[in-house]
Image (cartoon, rainbow, N blue to C red):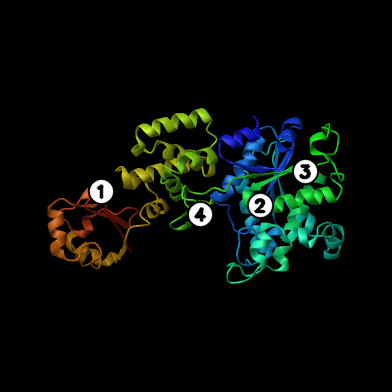
Amino acid sequence: MNLIDELRWRGMFHDMMPGTEEHLLQHAPITGYIGFDPTAPSLHIGNLATIMLLVHLQRAGHRPLALVGGATGMIGDPSGKSAERNLLDEDALRRNQAGIQAQLEKFLDFSEGPTGAKVVNNYDWFKNFGFLQFLREVGKHLTVNYMMAKDSVKRRIGGNEDSGADGISYTEFSYQLLQGYDFVHLFREYGCTLQMGASDQWGNITTGTELIRRMGGEPEGTDIASQQPTTNNQQPTKAYALTGQLITKADGTKYGKSETGTVWLDGSLTSPYQFYQFFLNAADADVPRLIRVFTLLSQAEIEALEAEHAQAPHLRTLQKALAKDVTIRVHSEAAYEAALAASQVLFGGGELSSLDEATLLDVFAGVPHVAVPRASLAEHNVISLLSEATGGVIFASKGEAKKMIQAGGVSLNREKATLDQAATQVPLLLDKYVVAQKGKKNYFLIKVG
């Protein structure tokens, strides 16, 4: 598989240094890497787009390295930021690193062999690197002028109201030098000749290729076009850069946030049900690109799905295929089945009793919640339960509740409510919940405690 061709048809390719494609074709397997900052306990779906670059690198017959930035995570990348980030302590960083490594292992093949993936941590080579030693051995190779010319620095350097930036500290200013040295270290230790990342990382990545050149990787004046291929037992002499497209919506806004915030890969931060729903609710204008970026479906498979979707867009064929594929790979087949069952409960009349408590609360997270004391149930019939006992949230009066129950417009845990029904006769889900449905679309969750 030609990596560049694969990324192009998927809409994932943004830019590369001259000679990169030839290098990939002539020196397989090459080693390439992407860095991930452990500034949160989990990666999110924006990171997933970047992980897919490593996945395709490996599928094309190359070796991926995933760098968890235990050292650079202490600094904070200024790229795309308008203000200084809060610095995390070492304990928080270690917890975050462990969570991220576990997530990366879901997507890459870590078996032994020339294309087996590996996770590395830049804290391992920075922890004993003294400040003066770093300045002498690394810092002297790049000028301040070169570093200030990077877009990530220029956007912050003004520090005035018009720029919307707060300036940049020396700490964040030095980030590109640290990331650049990561590439130098991996180039020397693993023969890593390619760094990849999102398009906003171009400045940091090319700092690495420049450091490699200036620190002896490539002799001055080497002509890329005339550079001779190296054999497997020769040290590579040049490093390359490749960036992928940032994932945005059709309107140009950043993709990856829901109404409740960032969509995380960790199921304890974004539940599998919420994760599944996020992709299921993708707009028709966005889903053709998303299914190319986030799945491994072939071009023929995707085009067949698109043709089927065009015949009946209301069936959301593309969204269902996207949500299924990504949910299974990020979580599991069982998590997908549970998310699908939960969706059918809300939209297709599935059994409420099939849901565990966490999924039930997820499914009805956006509906009004009402608490009713368990001891008070004996004092109410269904009419007063849905009006007085619930504080008028469901029905403003007993008369309104009676009228709608009489018309057959009220269901309790999917069973039609009746006028002569006592509150104690309503079966409880998980011994404490009642899902009340008023009309076709109005849901309420009653918790009996």
- Disc 4 residue type? Ser
Closer to us: 436 or 449: 436
Q: How far apart are marks 3 and 4 (CA)?
A: 39 Å
Q: Quadrant of residue 236?
A: top right
The quarter in which the N terminus is drawn is top right
Q: Where is residue 372 in the image (x, y as percent from the top left)?
A: 29, 65
Q: For the residues marked 1 and 3, what is the alpha-carbon distance in whole angstroms?
A: 63 Å
Give the residue at mark 1: 414
Q: Which mark is residue 239?
A: 3
Which is nearer the N-term, disc 1 or disc 2? 2
Q: Which amino acid does label 2 sit on?
A: Gln
Label 1 residue SS: loop
Q: Are marks 1 and 2 in contact (CB under 8 Å)?
A: no
Could you give the CA–CA distance between mark 1 and mark 4, rounded to whole angstroms?
Answer: 29 Å
Please give the name of the residue rendered at 76% of the width and 30% of the height, measured from the top-left corner: 26
Please say if the residues under marks 1 and 4 sit with CB atoms less than 8 Å apart.
no
Closest to the observer, 340 or 15: 15
Check disc 4 and report the residue beneath it. 268
> Residues under labels 2 and 3: Cα distance?
16 Å
Name the residue nearer the viewer: 448 or 128. Answer: 128
* Residue at the image position 85 percent from the left and 39 percent from the top: 235
Quickly name the residue at label 2: 201
Residue 52 spot, x, y in % from top left:
60, 41
* Residue 256 image point, x, y percent: 51, 52
Residue 351 visible in image: no
